[in-house]
Structures are given as C-alpha cells and as structure tokens.
Image (cartoon, helix red, strand yellow):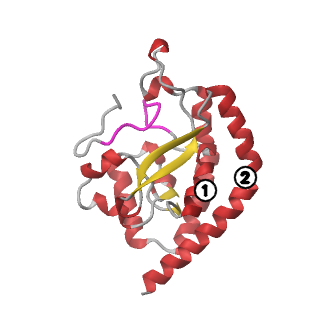
Amino acid sequence: MKRTGANRGKRAFDVAVAAVLLVLTLPIQLATAIAVRLRLGNPVIFRHTRPGLHAEPFELIKFRSMSNVDPAKGHTDNASRMTPFGIWLRASSLDELPSLWNVIRGDLSLVGPRPLMMSYVPRYSPEQARRHDVRPGITGLAQISGRNALSWEDKFLLDVHYVDHHTFVGDLKILCGTVRSVVRRDGITEAGETTSSDFLGTGEPLESP
C-alpha cells in the first residue's frame, strides 16, 4: 500500500511538472520545430512504438534528429543519416521536449528506465526485463551515469537498481543530475559510434546494420 501511495505521488508530480515545462518550453519547441523543418524537412515529429509499463507498447513522440532514408545519397543507416544538426539536437536534449506529452498521457514518467526498442524485449534476461516493472522515463539513473558511454549490461544493472530503490528524493537527484549531464554533454554517444549500438542480447552489442 505504501508503494502504491508513492506511485500515485510520483504520477501527480510527473503531471504537474510536465504540464508546467510544456507551457514554459512552447517557444523553444516552436523554434526547434522550425529548425527541424528547415534542416531535415518533414516530418518534424518522430513517432515510434516503444515498450512502456509491463512492456505494453505506446507511441513515443520526439523531434526528428535524423535525415530521411535516401539510398541515392547513401543515407541508409543511422550513422549516415545523422547530421551535425541532429547530433546537436540530441546533445542538447531538445529532441526530447515533445515527450512531455507522453508524460501527461501516462506513457512515461519524468524519471525511469529509458524506453528502448520493442525488438529488445524478447532479448532481455529475466533480470533485465524487470526494468519494465516501472513506467519508463524521459531520463533515468543510467542517463546521469554515462548515458551511451555505458555498456548495455551496465545500463540494465542501473535500470533494475532504480526499479528496486527509487524514491522521490532520488528522482529529484536524477533530474538535477540530468541537467548537469546535458550542460556538460556527457556520454552522448558511444566511443567510435555516431549513435548507440543495437542490443543483441547476450555478449557484446554490435554496430547497427
């Protein structure tokens, strides 16, 4: 019952903060949308199905940070589709601002394990799959501990640790740590990678095809 009450308090905090941030960042979001339209074209919003609480799928929304697939220009994989503007957009985390709508709708929390790919769900070990026992978040413990510079295994250890030990005070610390990480641009990509590599299950993750 205590945990249920804490979860209700977490949800109320999420909605209140997300609503305020959504209003305050509307001018920034408008400017970002215009920049995405001019630099990358349409669509401005990236929509993708991700696993949420208990791995139930939902539609994540973000600003698009990659160019469209264009075999004629050699834009066929993530690395070739990532532009300097897209790298800056991700480094600044401005691409995440539309996800505040996901928080208000109940798909996301402000803090929790990041929602990854639906294709990863069957690849998790039973212990790793526990990351879906809480609502996923815009930011999380792994994001203030190295972001994409961490191995997948280390990220999932941190995710499960969060599931077992999250508190309101801990969430506030993660939110403050997120601001510091964004300002410092820590761990935006893996060493030698333009974006994070795919999680393939056991063993070392390989570069996306």
Label 2's element? loop
Q: How crowded is mark 1: few (under 14 residues within 10 Å), some or many (20 or more)?
A: many
**Of the residues shown, which amino acid type is indicated by label 1?**
Leu
Q: Give the residue at the far bottom of this rendering.
A: 1
- What residue do we see at 25% from left, 49% from top? 123
Residue 81, how many percent across, how many down? 50, 25
Residue 120 part of the magenta segment: no
Residue 193, how many percent across, how many down? 43, 31
Task: Out of 87 and 36, give the one closest to the viewer.
Answer: 36
Q: Can residue 139 be spotted in the picture?
A: no
- What residue do we see at 74% from left, 40% from top? 31
* Residue position for label 1: 100
Q: Which image quadrant: the C terminus?
A: top left
Residue 192 part of the magenta segment: yes
Tell me if label 2 and label 1 are in contact, CB under 8 Å.
yes
- The relative height of residue 170 versus residue 201 in the rendered view (above or below) is below
Label 1's element? helix
**Of the residues shown, which amino acid type is indicated by label 2?**
Thr
Task: Out of 101 and 197, give the one closest to the viewer.
Answer: 101
Query: Is 175 left or right of 160, judged from the image as shown?
Result: right
How many marks can you see? Answer: 2
> Which span is picked out in magenta?
189-199
Q: Can residue 69 be spotted in the picture?
A: yes
Residue 63, how many percent across, how many down? 59, 41
Closer to the N terminus: mark 2 or mark 1? 2
- What residue do we see at 37% from left, 71% from top? 164
**Residue 10 in which image quadrant:** bottom right
Q: How crowded is mark 2: few (under 14 residues within 10 Å), some or many (20 or more)?
A: some
* Residue position for label 2: 25
Query: Is 105 left or right of 118, judged from the image as shown?
Result: right
Examine the residues drawn in magenta and state their main secondary structure: loop
Alpha carbon separation for disc pair 2 and 1: 10 Å
